């Protein structure tokens, strides 16, 4: 097994933890910090989660061909929330948010200026523009996020017809220039069931909404229009789909959602952010009985990392996955490197490590 694509043993229903670990192992800024900056000696003894994750991260990227058994790390993860009951299936999206929050805190506590590579890498923001429909008085509210949680619209146009409804500029957002303009769409046309696309889920999230709110200028309750827009693009864009419904009739939304290789967010911001897909976590099975596995793009080659199963796969395998979480990297952080005999790939620019990454040395 080569560095970065290692088997991780499933310690009874720990696939949700394994998938998140493999996801974070393929975030380049984190790799720089955990493999090149942090050392066992520079991590304070009281930051146990940080120390265990640092050890696990380096095992994944080591030259040794070993199957990793993360027993100590998993046991520590169980303590992060009372909902993480040992040896039971859990929601990997919930685990991701709890884990990132705790890791973010420990990284800030280990740094003299309180810097964390987690916030620096994943934090983004959108701004809600709130406008009174009577006097046009407008306020703005900034909404930071580490991950966007998108609903799957029940009555959304399918990918069979979406290209007919979108403008040419919008259509490019779900195109794939490496395989012809509409090749991802062609594969879907042959499917018996219509397929949604991530673009439409984003469009539903950023659509204007009406709400009753207090207007400072009118001095009373008035109808307002809320217009959300992207204002701060994260370096790595985490998106989850709301597949699980917890109510009287708890259920899973199993609709296929097309996740494009290239994502252009120009429709939601004047800044025109462009991203490349680098990882997809799939949930198969049912609400209370299922399994998580992850597909990662390592130097242009897609890999399936499914606990102790590691193998190369094609884009078609990724395309057909029942996506639960996907991760994109901003293209302006990358450079196109042509590889003879294969398609062009995106590799991170070799940026020297700034001093703010250096951890605090304990006296």
Image: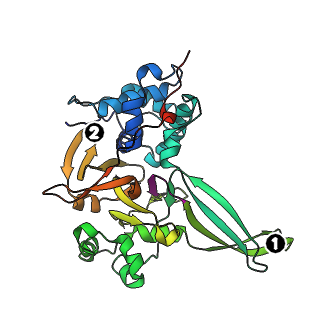
Q: Position of residue 236 (x, y in %)?
A: 44, 51
Q: Give the residue displayed 27% in from the left and 75% down from the top.
A: 181
Residue 26: percent from left, percent from top: 34, 44
Q: Earlier in the sequence, mark 1 or mark 2?
A: 2
Above-or-below relation of 93 to 189: above
Instruction: Indicate which label's residue lies in the foreground, 1 or 2.
Output: 2
Which portion, as a residue range, is magenta? 232-240
Q: Quadrant of the C terminus?
A: top right
Image quadrant for the N terminus? top left
- Residue at image point 44% right, 59% down: 243
Quarter of the image for residue 284 reads bottom left
Residue 91 is inside the magenta segment: no
For disc 2, the marked residue is: 4
Q: Residue at x 52, y 25 (%)?
A: 47
Q: Is residue 126 left or right of residue 211?
A: left
Outermost residue to the top: 363
Q: Position of residue 97 (x, y in %)?
A: 51, 45
* In this view, 57 is above or below 351: above
Q: Nearer the viewer, residue 47 or 287?
A: 47
Would you name the residue on which mark 1 appears?
A: 221
User: At numbered mark 2, what does the secondary structure look like: helix, strand or loop?
Assistant: loop
* Residue nearer the viewer, 95 or 145: 145
């Amino acid at each position: 097994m080569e560095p970065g694509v290692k088997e991780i043993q499933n310690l009874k229903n720990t696939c949700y933890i394994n998938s998140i670990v493999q996801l974070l192992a393929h975030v380049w800024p984190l790799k720089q910090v955990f493999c090149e900056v942090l050392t066992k000696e520079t991590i304070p003894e009281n930051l146990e989660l940080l120390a265990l994750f640092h050890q696990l991260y380096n095992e994944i990227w080591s030259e040794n061909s070993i199957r990793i058994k993360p027993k100590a790390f998993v046991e520590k993860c169980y303590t992060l929330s009372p909902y993480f009951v040992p040896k039971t299936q859990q929601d990997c999206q919930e685990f991701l948010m709890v884990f990132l929050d705790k890791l973010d805190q420990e990284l800030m506590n280990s740094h003299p200026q309180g810097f964390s590579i987690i916030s620096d890498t994943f934090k983004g923001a959108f701004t809600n523009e709130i406008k009174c429909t009577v006097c046009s008085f407008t306020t703005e509210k900034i909404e930071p996020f580490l991950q966007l949680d998108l609903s799957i619209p029940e009555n959304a146009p399918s990918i069979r017809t979406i290209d007919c409804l979108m403008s040419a500029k919008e259509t490019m957002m779900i195109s794939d220039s490496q395989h012809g303009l509409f090749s991802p769409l062609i594969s879907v046309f042959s499917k018996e069931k219509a397929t949604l696309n991530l673009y439409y889920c984003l469009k539903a999230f950023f659509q204007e909404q009406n709400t009753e709110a207090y207007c400072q200028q009118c001095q009373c309750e008035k109808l307002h229009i809320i217009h959300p827009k992207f204002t701060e693009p994260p370096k790595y864009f985490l998106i989850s789909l709301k597949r699980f419904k917890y109510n009287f009739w708890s259920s899973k939304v199993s609709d296929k959602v097309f996740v494009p290789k290239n994502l252009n967010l120009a429709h939601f911001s004047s800044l025109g952010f462009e991203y490349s897909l680098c990882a997809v976590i799939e949930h198969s099975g049912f609400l209370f009985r299922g399994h998580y596995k992850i597909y990662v793009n390592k130097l242009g080659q897609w890999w399936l990392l499914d606990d102790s199963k590691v193998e190369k796969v094609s884009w078609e395998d990724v395309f057909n996955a029942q996506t639960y979480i996907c991760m994109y990297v901003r293209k302006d952080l990358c450079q196109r490197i042509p590889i003879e005999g294969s398609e062009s790939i995106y590799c991170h620019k070799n940026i020297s490590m700034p001093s703010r990454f250096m951890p605090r040395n304990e006296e």
